[in-house]
Amino acid sequence: MKFVDEFRDAQLGRVLAGEILGVLEAGRHYKVMEVCGGHTHSIYKYGIDGLLPSNVELVHGPGCPVCVIPMGRVDDGIAVAMREGVIFTCFGDMLRVPGSRYTLLDAKARGADVRMVYSPLDALRIARENPGREVVFFAIGSETTAPSTALTLKRAKAEGVENFSCVCNHVTIVPPLRALLESPDLRLDGFIGPGHVCTVVGARPFEFIAADYRRPVVISGFEPVDVLQSILMVLRQLREGRCEVENQYRRVVAREGNLRALEVMAEVFELRAHFEWRGLGFISQSALALSDAYREFDAEKRFEVPGVRVADPKACQCGEVLKGVIKPWECKVFGTACTPEHAIGTCMVSPEGACAAYYNFGRLAREREAV
Ligand code: SF4
């Protein structure tokens, strides 16, 4: 297939849904986790869950980068943004993520110079244009976005841009998956692997899931036909008693990943000893900090940040949603006190968040589950 409409072909989707029915074992309930928020978005946008039989349950994973940012990190960002002379830059979704008292958008309304950017290179350009100001980039995302931050920092260093720094919140996806697999709360039969992350790290880092935990993994693309085919491939492995890492997204993902991107990341970043994930707690070696060679660009070193841990609001059940323990609509404040316009939790902010995807596209799925 060459064109995007072929990956959205409804007839092909129905054929795949029929093949899924053909590989299921009678009386068995299947739980398949889609790790990445991009897949969650596709599943609800295209009604993929509506094509599946009721004994195939999709469980949403912790792969939405905005959703996993804890309140304390938002507070740290706001503390930097409120400083005199600082221009604070971040991606658009981040502006609306609640901290313990307010959001970065509220900080902007209170006078902080907070600007939305589409790329860390935009933030670097702002630094060049404002040599008398400190320009800070609030970096979020997993291995998908970390290379662009790394390349921007390399460029800042090469150009000697001294008024640029970065609050590094980049996370790595494998440690939380291991934590989920160790969790007694959750029985998962297989995984839809995060296609975007794998374009950088390759398929190899996910091989432990098959080898150590005997669960199939299929690295998947993001179009509806991709996702349906990947679900079929997971279920077929279960039917045949196989546990392997298969690559449905071969048009993009290589087993070894993007070696040049990995090389730049290794130069600019090092693993943090531990990092707090929203709802999942502290996980060892699950995030990146700037390496010694790039320490001068570390905003956490350049400015004083509170660095305190803030508990989530009592009503918020993002942790359970991110672990796949509850469905978004089972949270007590879903769609009432918590909506995309007025989010209490992070999962309602980004379009990749499970609650936002469910809110925007999931009405039919909810009705189906209620029957
Ligand atoms: S509805 Fe809001 S508070 Fe509840 S889990 Fe979703 S984002 Fe979190």
Image (cartoon, rainbow, N blue to C red):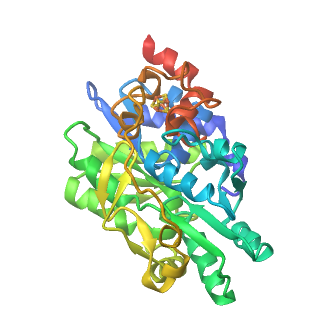
Kindly indicate the quadrant of the structure image that contains residue 232. Answer: top left
**Left or right: residue 190 compared with residue 366:** left
Extreme-top residue of the structure:
371
Q: Position of residue 3 (x, y in %)?
A: 72, 54
Kindly indicate the quadrant of the structure image that contains residue 358. Answer: top right
Q: Is residue 65 visible?
A: no
Residue appearing at x 53%, y 77% in the figure = 261
Quick one: 98 or 331, which is closer to the camera? 98
Q: Position of residue 180 (x, y in %)?
A: 28, 47
Q: Is residue 56 above or below residue 234?
A: above
Residue appearing at x 56%, y 64% in the figure = 145
Picture quarter with the N terminus: bottom right
Q: Is residue 189 visible?
A: yes
**Left or right: residue 308 compared with residue 94:** left
Q: Position of residue 317 (x, y in %)?
A: 40, 31
Picture quarter with the C terminus: top left
Q: How many marks?
A: 0
Q: Position of residue 144 (x, y in %)?
A: 54, 63
**Left or right: residue 317 compared with residue 273:** right
Q: Is residue 170 above or below residue 98?
A: below
Residue appearing at x 39%, y 52% in the figure = 308
Q: Is residue 94 above or below residue 98?
A: below
Extreme-right residue of the structure:
129
